[in-house]
Structures are given as structure tokens and as C-alpha cells.
Amino acid sequence: MISAPRILLVGAGQLGSRHLQGLVKITADCRIDILDPSTAALALSRTRADEIKGAERHQLRFLEDASDLNDDYDLGINATTSRYRADSMKTTGPLAANWIIEKVLSQNLQQMETIEHAVKGADNTWVNLMMRELGWLQELYNALERETITGFETSGKDWSLACNAIHHIDLVAWLSRSQITRVITDQLHDEWKPSKRDGNFDLLGTLKVDYDNGLEASFSSLEDGPDRISQLTTNGKNWVIDEITAQVRCNDETVFSGVFDRQSDLTTTLAERVLSKLPLNLPRLEFAAATHRIFIAAMLNYWQKTMARNDQHVPIT
């Protein structure tokens, strides 16, 4: 691993503070700069870092202004909300050799281009579609190598479809070795409701997604019912992905199991691998941006249609 790694965390709120908890568990002594214009967010991150035993080994700087940053970070993590991601990456993108960027990448296609341009000089840029990093789902991926997925459905009670569907859309692309070609929104509900994060919205209903191998997947967020579960079919086999129990069942028999890693644990693993120059299983920006473009364009169009507004961004994160 790089000696005395230099790490930049952009965004210190709820998600950013969990990333910081993971970073302070890195075995090497690190210099970590945390950037956020909000003093409340910085205070939250400081408090959560202090909860981790050994955090004092690292040199932490909590910064409100990007002018105080260095220009030679080994790793950058962007954990802002999607509304501010492009602007923050425009400023900080050139400062790190490697990046991990949170989803949803952006709220329109112009912001996406800004992000891609900002990291052109980086050695590696990944997007944190983290289901690819779960060991028990990697076992499923390997088991499906010689299988053809003929159907895929995710369904459950109100699971913040607009904000979280991108995880499952990417999961299907990964498991089926394919890319998305179309997102169909005509089975979504018309009513948008405020999401858990201020200024953002979500909705119920079903998204249909087409893939370039001919597969059509559906993702449904219901007003009531059981917790989210995914079902897929291959030749003569029925598979169930249960995220609550972190299990995969095939024809009613548990075949793979593990844990659904918290971000504060997963970040430690991801960062240590990047700093040791080892590959990640996360999708690279090029692949994830192609997925996001189709998804964001469809969701923005639906927002404009149902809200009868000509907004140039869709407020999901």
C-alpha cells in the first residue's frame, strides 16, 4: 500500500460521514481531507469519525473551502447529493489520481458531461454501485456464467424507486453481462412525493428496463406489501435474491449467503484495494455513465411530463 496515503472526501453529510468511518479504519496512517460547505455536515462527520477506535491515528482536516485543498490525492470519494455533484467534481476532479463517485451521478445529462470531463486525467474512476462488491452476489455472478437470464423482477414496499433503482438496474446488467438500451416509465405513478433527502423526490410504480441481450427487467415500488426481493429465471431454474437475509436461493434452496455490508465497512475494503493498486468490482465511470444517461433522460422526461414543468433537472439522488 502507498505510504501515508492522501485521501479527499467530498461531502460530509449522512452518506459522507459513513464513508469517513470506513476511511479511518484503513490500516495505514492516512492524511484525510473532508470538504463540505456545511459546518453541520462537517460536525456530523467529525462526531462519527470519533466513534471509530483508532481514528486518531489519521490526520484529518475538516474544510469548508476548496481553496484549502491539496492537488495530489491518491484517492477521492465524492459523496455529495446528485444536485451538487457536478459542481463539486468540476473543482475537485483534477486533484485525485483515483475516484469513487456516488450514485445517482447527476440530475441531467449536462452535469454528467461535467463529471466525465473533470476526471479525464484520473487513473481510475468508479461509481459506487456497490451490489457488485458483495461476496454472496459475486458467487451468484459466477454461477450464472453459463446460464441465460430470461426474466428479472425486483419488487417490494416503498423502497425509493427513483433514487435506488439504479443499483438494481446495474445489478441486472452485471449479472446478465449486458447493457441497458431503454427505460420505460409508463407504469410509474403520477404523484411525486418528497424523499428522505431535502429537495429530492420519489414515486411509486414500476420501471421497465430493456437490455441489449433481449432481456426486459421490471422494478416495482409498492404502496404496501413485503420487503424488497428480486427474482430471476434461467433455463429451468428460479433464483431469489433476498437482501434482508443476504441470501440467494435457487429452486427454494439456499445456495449463497453472506452479509449486506454497511458502507462504513465497504469503504475500508474499497479504499485499501485502490491504495494497493488492486482492481475494484465496481463499474467504471464509462459503463455507469452510459447506464445513467438512459435512466436520467427517462426520469427527467417523466418529471417534466407529470409535473407539467420544463425543469432542466430531475430532483432525485
Image (tube, grey):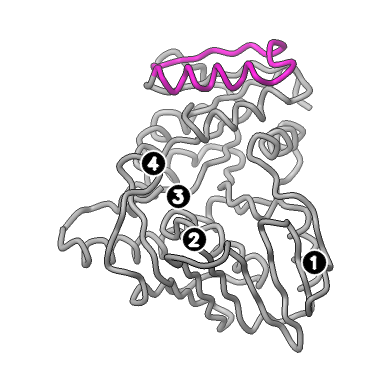
Q: Amino acid at mark 1?
A: Asn
Residue where numbered disc 2 is placed:
165
Choose the circle earlier in sequence order: 3 or 2: 3
Q: Quadrant of the N terminus?
A: top right
- Rendered image: mark on residue 313: none
Q: Amino acid at mark 3?
A: Val
Q: Would you call the spot at circle 3 few (<14 residues within 10 Å), some (14-19), or many (20 or more)?
A: many
Label 1: element kind: helix
- Rendered image: mark on residue 197: 4
Q: Magenta stretch?
A: 39-66
- Rendered image: mark on residue 104: 3
**Viewer-nearest of discs 1 and 2:** 2
> x, y (%) of residue 142?
80, 66
**Viewer-nearest of discs 3 and 2:** 2
Q: Residue at x 72, y 75 (%)?
A: 239
Choose the circle earlier in sequence order: 4 or 1: 1
Image height of 57 relative to 21, above or below: above
Q: Amino acid at mark 4?
A: Arg
Q: Would you call the spot at circle 4 few (<14 residues within 10 Å), some (14-19), or many (20 or more)?
A: few
